[in-house]
Image (cartoon, coloured by chain):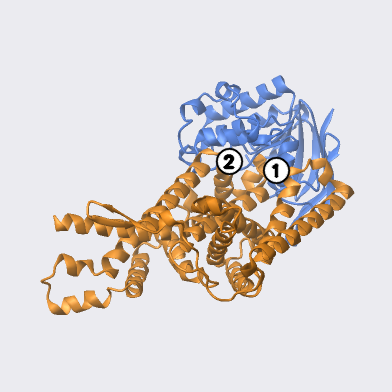
Amino acid sequence: MTLLEIHGVNTYYGESHILRDVDLTVNAGEMVCLIGRNGVGKTTLLKSLIGLLRPRSGTVLLEGKPMDRLAPHQRARAGVGYVPQGREIIPQLTVEENLLLGLEARPGGLGRHRQIDPIVYELFPILREFLPRKGGDLSGGQQQQLAIARALLGQPSLLLLDEPTEGIQPNIVQDIERAVRRIIAETGIGVLLVEQHLNFVRQADRYYAMQRGGIVASGPTADLSQDVVDRFLSV
Amino acid sequence: MWAVQLLVESLFNGIAIGSVLLIAALGLAIVFGLMGVINLAHGELIMLGAYTTYVVQLIFRLPLFQPFFDAYVLVALPAAFLVSGVVGVLLERTVIRRLYGNPLETLLATWGVSLILQQFVRSVPLASATGLVLALFVGLLAPALLPSELMAGPRGRFTSAGIWAGAALMGVLAAAGLGSLVSSLSRANPRNVDVTAPAWMRGSLDLAGLTMPVPRLVIIAITVVAVLGIAWFLARSVWGMRIRAVTQNRPMSDCLGIPTETVDVLTFGVGSGLAGVAGVAVSLLGSVGPNVGTSYIVGCFMVVVLGGVGNLLGTVIASLVIGVMTDLIGAGRLLTAWPGMPSSMATVVDFFATTSMAQVLIFSLIVVFLQFRPAGLFPQKGRLVEA
């Protein structure tokens, strides 16, 4: 089943043309990885999907419904979970409050949901320990786990992950990879991942490679040749 | 013994002065401190609250409500909150929303609004003004109460036209009714008016040789309740958490599913409503006029900046510090405490021993203080500042 479908998306920063006619699909239960060197527009694409940036042309369909006119909070409620580059934890709120804010994406928001699903403590045990701490006091890796847990609590149908392993110690990277795979297996959501770590990229089902704002190659990650890796991953 | 009494008396007066400052600045602490909006019309929102008290008090003089006259303040408080809150919401939706991120333009625009509001209460009869506010209240609130299907699509335009027509009708009826019941409200009055305090509020309490005027005590009580209420709202309620999240990281809060525009309206409405509550307090202290807000606005900004922008506790402490200092300097306490001081020094103390000169001295001291601690008494710490 096609979960996310985008057609001919063109996004600009002011006058500079960033995304050029991007087409892409993500199916339910599938992990799709977006690769490409720095500055080719991967983050811009994710921001265009959550609604922080408005494409000048093209359509974004979630479960067949167009989202182009929706604000980010409406897209979140429609089922898009977003873990941005740099995590964007609310710094002066406690870890618990940050997690609670994840519930806002559910229908009715915090007004109707107050229970933090314990699955997030199972995925990231460190969070339970740090509940009363300020989000801003956590280390980068802990913040990343918190950001993913926060997005998962909204029970999204599509999860957007922007470089979740960037600048994070290897053992936490493994935790994150395991958590993402487990969520896909258990809930059947679709994941669109921007990633540079080859190991994580290999776990995706399909890949899209970007260059200068356009998709230049795509296919199953099993077919990812060394040549493509050399061209599109900055390792 | 007299030293203790002097200390207690000075402390009480300081707290009394400080609590007026605090209740006046509390709404600004939210609007300026949390949203970063420089709202120069804040003083006029206080003024509207004071006028609301005046109107409520006149209504309570009608034969029907006369028996409950003693309790009109209890009605005036929520009424003033709603009136200033509604005007604040309207201000946010029409003017300030378009100027987020442009502090200079916001400052100019809200200054213009403050002048408009001052002239408004001079030239519009208060009965008509009451009707207008009622119509705005109904018109702004009704869409939130009706089922959302009615507001969607082409039918929505029809519904909202109906709502506004009904609201306008209600406003006109209320204005006409009020004008015919209380004739003084049906004419425009550019002069100051006086709010009659209920009998129980006129005296003073004597406690251990200390004379405490009842209105001052009432203001302190209102301030304490307002501060505790707003602290609870921000720290514990769902909307408070949403407000804090949006304040700290607007784009991410949006991505999490928080309706940021609704949060803006609510934050601004609550801040403005608190200005209305301050207006009730102000009306208990002296006459109410179109310029009553202007005399408070400078003090409000001083308190918020001295306390550290975005810090509620800082606002509380700053207003108390300014209050106590105003009393110490303005009443020449130093001279009372040390009668034998050299005459040259006594002249200086005496020179500043009036309310206005004390203010001059304190504001100068604040300016000097801010040279060394530009972020105020309690600056924001941590990664938030760097972001």
Q: Quick one: label 1 or label 2, which is nearer the N terminus?
A: 1
Residue furthest out toward the front: B63
Which shade is chain A?
blue
* Chain of the residue that carries numbered disc 2 in the rendered image: A
Q: Is residue B285 visible?
A: yes
Q: Position of residue B356 (x, y in %)?
A: 36, 74
**Callout 1: few (<14), some (14-19), or many (20+) C-alpha neighbours within 10 Å?**
many
Do the residues under discs 1 and 2 have CB atoms within 8 angstroms? no
Q: Position of residue B21 (x, y in %)?
A: 42, 61
What amino acid is found at the position of numbered circle 2 in the picture?
A: Arg
* Residue drawn at (56%, 32%) of the image: A145
* Residue drawn at (73%, 46%) of the image: B144
> Which residue is tagged 1?
A73
- Disc 2 secondary structure class: loop
Of marks 1 and 2, the one in the foreground: 1
Distance in Å between CA atoms under marks 1 and 2? 17 Å
Which chain corresponds to the colour orange? B
Q: How many marks?
A: 2
**Callout 2: few (<14), some (14-19), or many (20+) C-alpha neighbours within 10 Å?**
many
> Which residue is tagged 2?
A87
